[in-house]
Structure formats: structure tokens, C-alpha cells
Amino acid sequence: VQLQASGGGLVQPGGSLRLSCAASGRIASINVMGWYRQAPGKQRELVATVHTAGSTNYAGSAKGRFTISRHNAKNTVYLQMNSLNPEDTAVYYCQLHDSWFNVDYWGQGTLVTVSS
């Protein structure tokens, strides 16, 4: 399974970005796709996840500002990020959790920089 993330970039505080991540390969029909991020000098942390069935989970810092969604037929997950602030600056990684084999796959990461 390969994951290709895109959509990162430089945005001003208060701005918005939309990340996308497309999965390819032998993908389990039941899975969880999500976004994690890692800021400089910090550990990687959960941002949000979405199950094949549509249930979602958000980190507290993402609630109310970020929206995760997915297109199952395209094996693609999206992260709409609004009201961005400098604390959101990080490399954002997409992940696919294969629920059948209990295996995690990671994308290459996309850099989001929030700065004026």
C-alpha cells in the first residue's frame, strides 16, 4: 500500500488549507485513514481519523477547525483545515490502518507552515 499526500504549503494565520491523501495498492475494505502531524522538536501526534463507515475522531486541537472526510471509491482522505494558527505548523502525515491485518501504512508527509 502506498500513500501520496498533497496540499501543504505556506498560509497566513487565520487562513485555510486542504490536504489530500490517495492510497493505492492492496487496500483492505475495512480501514481507518487519518492524519497525524509532527512539529519541529515534538513527537508525532494524532490530528484526526475517519473509518470506512464514516465515524470520525479528532484531537482536541483540531475540533471545530478541521474536518476530515474520505471518498471510499477513490481511497482518498481529505483534511480541511480552517482558522490555522502558527501552532499548526508541522509536517502532516497521512496514515492508513488496515483493520484486517492490523498494519499501519504511512505517507511521505506534507509540510504546512502557518506564518505571516
Image: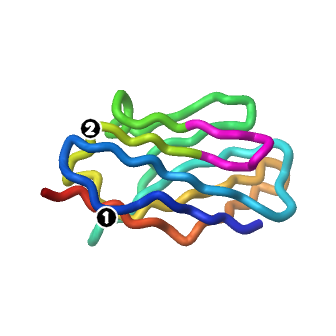
| Left or right, residue 10 beside residue 105 | left
Looking at the image, tell me whether mark 1 or mark 2 is earlier in sequence order: 1
Q: Is residue 36 visible?
A: yes
Q: Quadrant of residue 56?
A: top right
Query: Residue 71 magenta-drawn?
Result: yes
Kindly give the residue lying farthest to the left in the view shown: 116
Q: Which mark is residue 86?
A: none
Hey, what amino acid is under mark 1?
Ala
Q: Mark 2 highlights which residue?
A: 83
| Left or right, residue 102 beside residue 89 | right
| Left or right, residue 110 beside residue 39 | right
Q: CA distance from mark 1 to mark 2?
A: 18 Å
Q: For mark 2, give the secondary structure.
A: loop
The residue segment tinted magenta is 69-77
Nearest the camera: 116 or 48? 116
| Left or right, residue 91 beside residue 73 | left
Residue 45, how many percent across, how many down? 42, 55
> Badge 2: few (under 14), some or many (20 or more) residues near its Cα, within 10 Å?
some
Residue 105 drawn above or below residue 48: below
Query: Residue 31 magenta-drawn?
Result: no
Nearest the camera: 43 or 85? 85
Residue 5, how many percent across, how many down? 56, 62
Hey, what amino acid is under mark 2?
Ser
Q: Nearer the viewer, mark 1 or mark 2?
A: 2
Q: Mark 1 highlights which residue?
A: 39
Say which residue appears at 21% left-offset and 41% top-offset. Answer: 14
Labelled pair 1, 2 in contact (Cβ < 8 Å): no
